[in-house]
Image (cartoon, coloured by chain):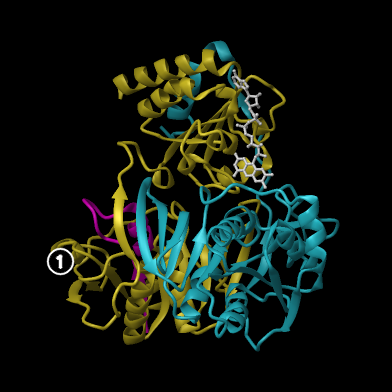
Amino acid sequence: MKILVLISHVPDTTARIAFTNDNTAYDANGVQFIVNPYDEWYALVRALELKEAQGGSVTTITVGGAATEPTIRKALAIGADDAVRVDAEPKDGHDVAVQVAAYAKDKGFDLVLAGKETIDHNGSQVGPMVAELLELPFISLAAKLDVAGGKATAERDVRGDVEVVECALPLVVSCAKGMAEQRIPNMRGIMAARTKPLQVVPAVASEALSTSVKFELPPPKQAVKLIPAEEAGKLIELLHTEAKVI
Amino acid sequence: MSVIVFADTRGAKVAKSALETLTYGRKLANKEGTTLTLATFGDAPADRLAALDANKVTVARNIGDADNQQLARFVADVAAKEGAKWVICSHDDTGKAVAPRVAARLKAGEVAGATTLPNEQGHIKRNVFSGKAQAWVELKTPVKVVSLLPNSIPVEAAQGTATVEEFTGDTGTAKVTVKEVRKAGEGIPLPEAEIVVSAGRGMKGPENWGLVEELAKELHAATACSRPVSDMDWRPHHEHVGQTGLAIRPNLYIAIGISGAIQHLAGVNGSKVICVINNDPEAPFFKAADYGIVGDAFQVLPKLIEAAKKLNAEK
Ligand SMILES: Cc1cc2nc3c(=O)[nH]c(=O)nc-3n(C[C@H](O)[C@H](O)[C@H](O)COP(=O)(O)OP(=O)(O)OC[C@H]3O[C@@H](n4cnc5c(N)ncnc54)[C@H](O)[C@@H]3O)c2cc1C
């Protein structure tokens, strides 16, 4: 089975969020970047498990400049066989999808896995857009994924219920919590990753259909109103009469 | 030119998220001086559809929500027929898959998870960096797609007198099919809950969740938890909120025995009111809270349950 995993390069979950150029650009100064957790913990690890059980290959693809290569090497250290970097700064979600689809189009991937969203743009756009551009079916928010007899079976948490869905390969799946357990790369993996193939391909022409023109930070929160533990019941009263939320 | 709203109208009553998208669509249509067309699917009776605040309803009777490719073909088809300038979906489980597909199909710019209507410059706000910041997005295309974050605008439900017509276009066959649905218990689904009672490692073990559930029941709330709690299987995965779980924005979020790590806050900082109960006065969560109680959860929870019961009896 040939699997393609979308890997996004994002600021660490604890990174300071600040903006430069009159709040028009993210300030990446001194920020540590990581593999987007949904891409790493769920999509990549599940791809590796499927390959280990059934044979095949796991390729990762990232749209980004050379600065994303340490992040890509991390994905290789966890176990991907090879990686592709489309050499361009992503313009928007649609642009990323166009680049991925342009690469994947004639490669015969059976399965394309994406994280359910990235933790910086939080768009949940790239997976379904890739599916649309490749004219493939798409299963969103899968918490479990299995493949047997040319068919994928996935479980999705929808509105508290669990929905079991089925679809013939090839298809695109976006991966959420529950699909796999995080894997910490070992020394052998890290060494091997240095020499695994990382192919850099040029971007295809594509226009930004949207731009983030300005960023804002939320206003600082007012100081917390403390209620003594002995009078805890007063909280319920305040939520009713003051905050009016119950 | 028109505004298209795609919404799920199935079920016993039309979901709040669907009414929110209709309110959003109506406001846009008024602003643009145009009409609103609802594109929907499933078996909702025609009289119920006609009563929704749309000028026209196009309903695809024989497609479900399992295959978003079919839904996207349907919505794009309606959009093309109506000469749509705007296509509005909810940023819910279905909309999150359909809106980007429609956008790619129409080569339209998309705002995913919008929290506002367009401002004077036509820019729309959305959350970024997992709720730690917001961005104003400009859509550069003549056709624009918006998926609206649930609970972002109040519903203004006007009585409609829409004409209802059945969709006859071709959406192909469903490639994704539903094999089985395992119904969750009675509880309120977390993504739609207006009140959420959430607990963390401070509850010490799954055997103590009775208190959390009882408070949730009295407040008509859904239950949630921190990541370690679901990782240790004290609670099911779908209760995990935060940066790597579900992002929620209820009116009230009550956090019990949760430290308030940045990754946890990322999933709940859109809540309107946050209450924190923690025995450590230095817990970072207090900085993000509106109300707080420094105290032992096992002492505080029974008091809250009692007070909630009393309030319910008075209401
Ligand atoms: C990449 C990444 C992603 C992550 N994503 C998420 C995420 O999506 N969601 C998430 O929740 N976490 C996430 N985490 C983990 C996060 O960093 C914290 O470790 C986690 O939120 C802590 O959970 P907790 O508050 O339940 O436990 P702890 O941090 O152990 O906190 C327990 C709290 O309970 C209090 N307490 C103890 N006993 C009592 C008592 N008797 N009464 C009252 N209070 C008591 C303690 O004072 C403490 O504040 C992520 C971490 C990483 C690195």
Chain B color in figure: yellow
Left or right? Give the position of B145 relative to A40.
left
Q: Is mark 1 within 8 Å of ligand 1?
A: no
Q: Read off the magenta span.
A: B1-22
Image quarter (top left, top right, bottom left or bottom right) of the C terminus of chain A: top left
- Can you say whether B180 is above or below A76 in the image? above
The residue positioned 34% from the left and 36% from the top of the image is B187
What is the letter of the cyan chain? A
Q: Which residue is mark 1?
A: B46
Residue A115 or residue B79, whichever sits in front: A115
B4 falls in the magenta region = yes
Residue lying at the far top of the rendered structure: A230
The residue positioned 45% from the left and 15% from the top of the image is B302
Amino acid on which disc 1 is placed:
Ala
Q: Secondary structure at mark 1?
A: helix
Residue lying at the far right of the rendered structure: A30
